[in-house]
Amino acid sequence: MLRLREKGGKARWQPVSPTLFAALVEHAAARSARDPQEQVFRYRPRRGEEKGAPLTRRRYNTLADRWQRSLPWAAQYGVSPHWLR
């Protein structure tokens, strides 16, 4: 299970598949996020930096714009960063 932090400072536990959990752990480790309290989705560390910075709200919006342009079903259903939660 994953602990999700939501709007208004609320947190809840969400069941996920072992495959998704392993992929998220691998992604976080590749970006040097090792503390369980750290944000999972991060940039790659820059040269000379130990840890990648957490993704910003603007980056999530940019990604949503890209997937809506690239995936017809994403635009049809209005897939947004909110869906990641």
Image (cartoon, helix red, strand yellow):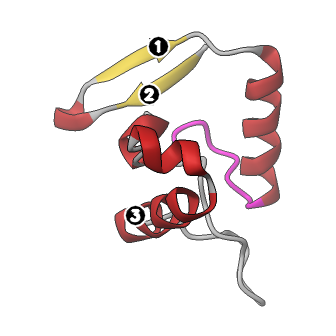
Nearer-N-terminus badge (1/2):
2
- State the residue at coordinates (46%, 50%): 75
Residue 24, percent from left and from top = 72, 38
Nearer-N-terminus badge (2/3):
2
Q: CA distance from mark 1 to mark 3?
A: 25 Å
Could you tell me what secondary structure mostly forms the magenta stretch? loop
Check disc 3 and give the amino acid type.
Answer: Asn
Q: CA distance from mark 1 to mark 2?
A: 6 Å
10 Å neighbourhood of mark 3: few (<14), some, or many (≥20)?
A: few
Q: CA distance from mark 2 to mark 3?
A: 19 Å
Secondary structure under badge 2? Answer: strand
User: Where the C terminus falls, by quadrant?
Assistant: top left
10 Å neighbourhood of mark 1: few (<14), some, or many (≥20)?
A: few
Proximity of marks 1 and 2: CB atoms separated by less than 8 Å = yes
Residue 7, percent from left and from top = 22, 36
Nearer-N-terminus badge (1/3):
1
11 in relation to 9, above or below:
above
Any magenta on residue 1?
A: no
Residue under pointer 1: 13
- State the residue at coordinates (82%, 29%): 22
- Observer-nearest residue: 58 or 7? 58
User: Where the N terminus falls, by quadrant?
Assistant: top right
Residue under pointer 2: 4
- State the residue at coordinates (59%, 53%): 41
Residue under pointer 3: 61
Task: Tell which residue pokes out farthest to the left in this image.
Answer: 8
> Can residue 38 be seen in the rendering of this structure?
no
